[in-house]
C-alpha cells in the first residue's frame, strides 16, 4: 500500500509541543505515522495497532529497519480488542482512519479493509480514544471534510473537543476535501486554518513544502 498524502500531512501537522512520552497509532498500515512522530519527537513509547495481517507484517518490518526500532512496537489486533486489554493511557493518539463509504468494493479484501470505514466505524474510534487518551493528551485525526460536523458531534458526546482544524484543498480552485482535527478533553476556542497542496500539477505550494519537506527525499 502506497503512502498517501493524508498520512504525510497528519504526521507532519500533529503537534508534539507537549513532548508526549507515549503515543498510539490506531490502524497503522505500514507504520508511516508512527515513524514520522518518532522522527519529530522524543517519545519513548510508540505503539501501533493494525488488524490486517499483511499490513501488520510490513509495519513491524519497517519499525525494525528504522532508526527508532527500540521505541516502536506494533500489535496485530483489532481496536476494540486493544481497548479491552490495555490499561495504559497515551499522551498522543493519532489516526488516519479508513473512511471510504462508497458502496463499491474491489475484489481485494485487504485493500477494502483499509479503505472502507466498516472496518473501523467512527463511533468505535472515538470510544477507544476517550478510553485510552491521557487527561491532558491530544488526539489527531484526518477525515473527509463532509464528515467533520458529524465527527465533532460524536467526539463532543464523549467530552472530546476540537482544538485545531486544518482544511486541505488540492488546489486553489478545488473544494476542501480533508479536515485534520486535533482534539483534547479541554474545551477551547478552535483555531482553524487552510492548506493548499498544489498550484498546478506537481507544483507544490510553499506552505505544503514547508510542512512536509522533512519527510520526502525529493521535495
Image (tube, rainbow, N blue to C red):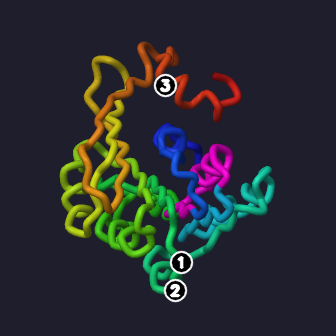
Alpha carbon separation for disc pair 1 and 3:
35 Å
N-terminal label among 1 and 3 = 1
The question of residue 193 being in magenta is answered with no
- Residue marked by disc 2: 85
Question: Looking at the image, which is closer to me, 196 or 54?
Answer: 196
Local crowd size for mark 2, using a 10 Å CA cut-off: few (<14), some (14–19), many (≥20): few
For disc 3, the marked residue is: 208
Q: CA distance from mark 2 to mark 1?
A: 9 Å
Task: Say left or right for 186 vs 70.
Answer: left
| Residue appearing at x 52%, y 18% in the figure | 202
Disc 1 secondary structure class: loop
Q: Nearer the viewer, residue 93 or 4?
A: 93
> Against 134, is 94 above or below?
above
Instruction: Single out the mark in the foreground, 2 or 1.
Output: 1
Callout 1 environment at 10 Å: few (<14), some (14 to 19), or many (20+)? few
Please give the name of the residue rendered at 39% of the width and 72% of the height, measured from the top-left corner: 128
- Magenta residues? 23-42
Please state if 109 lies on the left or on the right of 71 as rendered: left
Please indicate, yes or no, whether residue 119 appears anywhere in the rendered image: no
Residue at 76%, 54% in the rendered image = 68
Residue under label 1, please give it: 88
Q: At 38% from the left edge and 27% from the top edge, which residue is drawn?
A: 195
Relative to residue 40, is residue 202 depicted above or below?
above
Residue 111 picture location, percent across and down: 50, 57
Mark 3 or mark 2: which comes first in sequence?
Answer: 2
Q: Of residues 166 and 124, which is closer to you in this image? A: 166
Q: CA distance from mark 3 to mark 2?
A: 39 Å
Amino acid at each position: 500500500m502506497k503512502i498517501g498524502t493524508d498520512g504525510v500531512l497528519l504526521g507532519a501537522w500533529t503537534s508534539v509541543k507537549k513532548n508526549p512520552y507515549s503515543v498510539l497509532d490506531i490502524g497503522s498500515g505500514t507504520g508511516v505515522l508512527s515513524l514520522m512522530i518518532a522522527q519529530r519527537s522524543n517519545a519513548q513509547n510508540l505503539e501501533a495497532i493494525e488488524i490486517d495481517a499483511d499490513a501488520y507484517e510490513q509495519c513491524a518490518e519497517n519499525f525494525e529497519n528504522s532508526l527508532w526500532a527500540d521505541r516502536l512496537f506494533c500489535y496485530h489486533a483489532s481496536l476494540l480488542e486493544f481497548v479491552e486489554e490495555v490499561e495504559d493511557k497515551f499522551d498522543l493518539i493519532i489516526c488516519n482512519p479508513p473512511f471510504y463509504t462508497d458502496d463499491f468494493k474491489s475484489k481485494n479484501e485487504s485493500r477494502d479493509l483499509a479503505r472502507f470505514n466498516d472496518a473501523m466505524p467512527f463511533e468505535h474510534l472515538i470510544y477507544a480514544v476517550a478510553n485510552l487518551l491521557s487527561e491532558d493528551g491530544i488526539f489527531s485525526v484526518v477525515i473527509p471534510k463532509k464528515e467533520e460536523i458529524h465527527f465533532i458531534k460524536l467526539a463532543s458526546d464523549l467530552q472530546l473537543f476540537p482544538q485545531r482544524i486544518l482544511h486541505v484543498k488540492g488546489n486553489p480552485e478545488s473544494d476542501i476535501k480533508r479536515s485534520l482535527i486535533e482534539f483534547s478533553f479541554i474545551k477551547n476556542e478552535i483555531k482553524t486554518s487552510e492548506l493548499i497542496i498544489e498550484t498546478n500539477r506537481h507544483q507544490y505550494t510553499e506552505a505544503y513544502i514547508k510542512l512536509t519537506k522533512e519527510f520526502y527525499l525529493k521535495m
